[in-house]
Amino acid sequence: QLQLVESGGGLVQPGGSLRLSCAVSATILEHYSIGWFRQAPGKEREGISCLSATGSSTNYADSVKGRFTISRDDAKNTVYLQMDSLKPEDTAVYYCAADPRLFRLCLLYDVAYDDWGRGTQVTVSP
């Protein structure tokens, strides 16, 4: 079972930026597609971005497209989510998760992911 640890959350003003990190305890990170999800109070968990195991394919939810960027540092076994132009509606707990089955594609459906981190809180407020 993989261990995933998110970090980088915090309080930021609207229009600001944060970079979330997901450290993965995988021998070879390229064997896993990694997804970022978020859950706001009273709302369902939402898939917002993912990166395929090959690194060649990404997906973004419409709500974050053009503002968020996912990337990976294989040497550090870490996946990043750069979040720019943050809005109050981006406030949520953000989770990363690993999918060991897809390699060339990735999905924004949480049922596709086996292992999850505990999350990091992001609050966007004046």
Image (tube, rainbow, N blue to C red):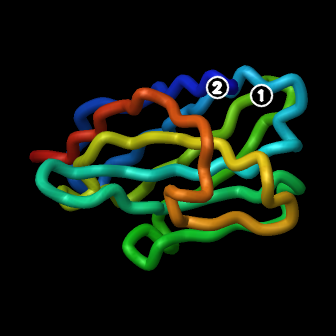
Q: Amino acid at mark 2?
A: Ala
Q: Is residue 99 above or below residue 120?
A: below
Q: For residue 119, which quarter of the picture?
A: top left
**How many residues crowd around disc 1 within 10 Å: few (fewer than 14), some, or many (20 or more)?**
some
Q: Is residue 101 above or below residue 122?
A: below
Horizontal side of 49 relative to 18 (left or right) equals right
Q: For residue 49, which quarter of the picture?
A: bottom right
SS class of the residue under badge 2?
Answer: strand
Horizontal side of 126 relative to 60 (left or right) equals left
CA gap, disc 1 and disc 2: 6 Å
Residue positioned 57% across, 42% down in the render: 97
Q: Is residue 48 above or below residue 36?
A: below
Residue 116 in percent (x, y) is at: 53, 35
**How many residues crowd around disc 2 within 10 Å: few (fewer than 14), some, or many (20 or more)?**
many
Contact (CB < 8 A) between labels 1 and 2?
A: yes
**Of the residues under marks 1 and 2, which one precedes in the sequence?**
2
Residue positioned 82% across, 52% down in the render: 53
Q: Amino acid at mark 1?
A: Asn
Q: Is residue 30 above or below residue 3?
A: below
Between residues 47 and 102, which one lies in front from this camera angle? 102
Q: Quadrant of the N terminus?
A: top right
Between residues 77 and 14, which one lies in front from this camera angle? 77
Marks counted in the figure total 2
Horizontal side of 7 relative to 39 (left or right) equals right
Q: Which mark is residue 38?
A: none
Residue positioned 78% across, 45% down in the render: 32
Residue positioned 29% across, 50% down in the render: 39
Residue 35 in percent (x, y) is at: 59, 52
User: To which residue does mark 1 refer?
Assistant: 77
Residue 118 in percent (x, y) is at: 42, 27
User: To which residue does mark 2 refer?
Assistant: 23
Residue 15 in percent (x, y) is at: 29, 56
